[in-house]
Each structure stands twice: as C-alpha cells, then as structure tokens.
Amino acid sequence: MAKKALIIGITGQDGAYLSRLLLEKGYEVYGALRKRLDSSPHNLATLGIADSIKFVPVELLEFTNILYVIKKSMPDEIYNLGAQSSVALSFEQPLFTADVTGMGSLRVIEAIRVLDKPVKFYQASTSEMFGKVRETPQTELTPFYPRSPYAASKLFGYWMAVNFREAYKMFICSGLLFNHESPLRELDFVTRKITYSVARIKHGLQDHIDLGNLEARRDWGYAPEYAEAMWLMMQQSEPDDYVVATGETHSIKEFVETAFSIVGIEIGWEGRGIQEKGIDKASGKVVVKVNPDFFRPTEVDVVRGDYSKAREKLGWSPRTSFRDIVRIMVEHDMKLLD
Ligand code: NAP
Ligand code: GDD
C-alpha cells in the first residue's frame, strides 16, 4: 500500500519540492492549506502537481483543526514546513511569529502524541538558530544563539521536538537547514528579490535595487536537493537531527555581482556604508543602492554549515554550485518577464 504523507506548509517553496519528490516516490500526498480548499496554489501549479495532491484545511493556530485533520488522514509521515518564515517580518510581528512558528509546531507534535499512533514527524528547523555563531562551521553540536523572534520561535519548536522524542520515544527528526533557494522563493527574500530585480533592470522596467546589509554572508543551497535530505532523515531506523548545508558562504554583494554577470552586466562598487552603490561598469548607471529600511535590529552576520553527518549517515551531499543556483533563478525570472 502507498505510504501517506501530510505536508503542512505545502504552498511554500519547500512544500512544493517535497510534494513533487514524494509523489515521484509513490506517496499519497495530503497538502495542508489554510486558505480556501478550491484555490490553486501557484507553486504546485508551476510544478504541474496540484491535481495529484489531496488538500486538507490546516491552520497552525488551531489545535482541534490539526488534531482532526491528522486523525482523518492518518498519515505515516508528517512534515511541518508551516511557519511565519520571514526573519525581517518577525521583528514587526513577534507574538504572531511565536504563535505560528513556535507554538504551531508544538500543536502538531502534541496532536500526534495524544493520538498515540506511530506517525513520523519532521520539524523544519533552521540555521538561524545558530544566529550569533559560537563556532564555525556549525554542526549539530554547536550551541544556539538566536538573533530574531523568528529564530527564537524556531528554537522553541526544536527543543519541543527533542523533548518529545526523548520523553515519549516519538519518531521526530529536525532538519537544521541552511538557506536554500530556487525560482519558487518568495520575492521578499534577498536572493529572489535580487534575481527578479536584475531581470526587471535588464528589461528596462526598473532602475535599481534597494538593499539592506550587503556584507551579510549565507550558506546558500538549492531547494529541491534539501527536500531530498528531509525525506532521507525520515527513512532512517532511528530519528535524529541533521545539518543540511553546502559548507560554503557568500556575501549578498557576491550574490548581486553573480546575478548581474549572468545578464552580462559587470558591477563595480563605490562609497562605503549607507553611501555604498553598485554601478554598471559599462553604462556608469547606479543599479544598487543601500536602504537602511532593510537593516534588521539584530543581524546574523555569517553562517556556514558542516553537513558531514548528513553525508555519512544519509548519503546526502549538495550538487548544485552557488553560480548555478543564481543562474537558474535569473534565467527563470528573465523568462517570466519575456
Ligand atoms: P515559505 O515559502 O515561507 O512557506 C511557509 C509555509 O507555511 C506556507 O505554505 C504558508 O502557507 C505556511 N503557513 C504560514 N502560516 C501558517 C499558519 N498559520 N498555518 C498553516 N500554515 C501556515 O517557507 P519555505 O522557504 O518553504 O520553508 C519551509 C520551512 O522551512 C519553514 O518553516 C521555514 O521557516 C523553514 N526553513 C526555511 C529555510 C529556507 O532557506 N527556505 C531554511 C531553514 C528553515 P500560506 O501560503 O497560506 O501562507
Ligand atoms: N530579505 C531581505 N531583503 N534581506 C536583505 C536585504 C533585503 O532587501 N538586503 C540585505 N539583506 C540581508 C538580510 O539582512 C540577511 O542578512 C540576508 O540578506 C538574508 O536575508 P533573507 O533572504 O531574508 O533570509 P534569512 O537568512 O534572513 O532567512 C531565510 O533563511 C533562513 C535559514 O537560514 C528564511 O528562509 C528563514 O525562514 C530561514 O530559516
């Protein structure tokens, strides 16, 4: 009989790639929607898989709703990808973020516990929990230091997952995933904001991009490969936590330079701090400006993950290079505007 999986957060970037993977593996996929059940989530439509998913209504703020949906669908595996996932927005909406992202995870774990059925659970944890990093590279044993309401909420979800695994012997895995990107990324995350703006600038629809901190560094991987790591964790005989990363780190500036280079524009930098500007070397036009509105009250300056455990125990390694990720995203956005 086909395995059943319930994906909470199916409309997001990772929900779409994980759904596609599980459908390819023959799973019956239940997708949690918090909007109208007859809407057509655009990421799933983009991948051409919306018709293969059984949609169920799930709101992470509503415990009885979660309990009822799990009881009715009785999945073998639940992937909790649902969250208020924007770090920037979490500074504006800390209580809401804590409720959805922190308490929401606990509501799902507690629903599985009270149902008392052997359901496997995946918790979407994050490199943001390392925040002001205590050591580099970060591993499963690196102490945490969250730097935003989002990261603190995820840390609560993480420790609940660990505690319920130890207390009730539940099969719970946490993926400590570093940033992962794709053409399905929402436009308010920096990578897609850059690739979409570069495509608009190239098409003459926009003059420049306003960005915040250009010096921050991230360990960026390719989202479809990170969905594979989630699934692999859930197929092991014992539940555990794994860092999923590339081991490389690049600055926002490097991302900007690479994205422009893909459309044939070479960038030079002038000025410092909030006066810094990215100039199109050929035309002399300013194409990048710093806008302090995009600075955060506290920042994660640099992260870099060590994925040795995932490589050794799951046989997982990243395959797509930094430049190829940027190229895939820019080419997608250029096509979108064509
Ligand atoms: P995303 O695109 O922002 O997707 C978030 C999903 O959560 C959406 O489907 C959203 O549904 C759903 N959601 C939000 N609030 C909800 C609520 N109250 N009840 C039910 N569902 C709700 O995020 P992603 O990039 O795919 O990431 C997936 C998960 O991994 C998130 O938990 C994120 O925090 C975590 N993570 C992401 C990364 C990364 O680099 N992408 C790295 C580490 C961890 P709507 O469409 O209805 O809003
Ligand atoms: N969003 C955004 N917009 N970020 C900017 C901008 C801008 O205009 N300019 C500079 N940045 C910097 C941010 O200050 C941050 O240092 C970096 O770009 C990355 O920001 P985001 O793309 O918003 O991602 P994030 O790293 O904060 O969070 C994402 O990755 C986490 C994994 O580490 C989200 O997907 C989280 O949900 C996820 O947990």
Image (cartoon, rainbow, N blue to C red):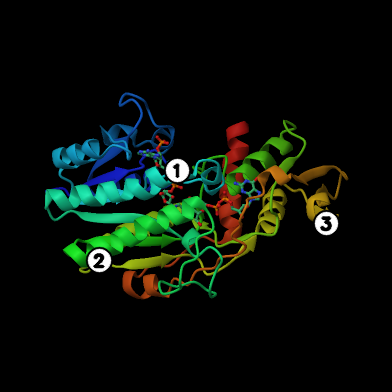
Is residue 106 visible in the rendered image? The answer is yes
Q: Categorize mark 1 by other alpha carbons within 10 Å: few (<14), some (14-19), many (20+).
A: some
Q: Earlier in the sequence, mark 3 or mark 1?
A: 1
Residue at image location 33% in from the left, 55% down from the top: 123
**Residue on which disc 2 sits:** 239
Q: Is residue 41 above or below residue 216?
A: above
Ligand 1 picture quarter: top left
Q: Are marks 2 and 1 in contact (CB under 8 Å)?
A: no
Q: Categorize mark 3 by other alpha carbons within 10 Å: few (<14), some (14-19), many (20+).
A: few
Q: Is residue 42 left or right of residue 278?
A: left
Please tell me whether mark 2 sits on a helix, a strand or a loop: loop
Q: What is the x, y in percent for residue 110?
A: 22, 50
Q: Is residue 159 left or right of residue 293?
A: left
Mark 3–mark 2 distance (CA, rounded to whole Å): 48 Å
Residue that extends furthest to the right in the rendered view of this protein: 284
Q: Are marks 3 and 1 in contact (CB under 8 Å)?
A: no
Q: Earlier in the sequence, mark 3 or mark 2?
A: 2
**Residue on which disc 1 sits:** 95
Amino acid on which the number 2 mark rests in the picture: Pro
Residue at image location 23% in from the left, 47% down from the top: 5
Q: What is the x, y in percent for residue 155?
A: 41, 59
Amino acid on which the number 3 mark rests in the picture: Arg
Is residue 80 visible in the rendered image? The answer is no
Mark 3–mark 1 distance (CA, rounded to whole Å): 36 Å
Which one is in front in this view, the residue at disc 3 or the one at disc 1? 1
Q: Is mark 1 within 8 Å of ligand 1?
A: no
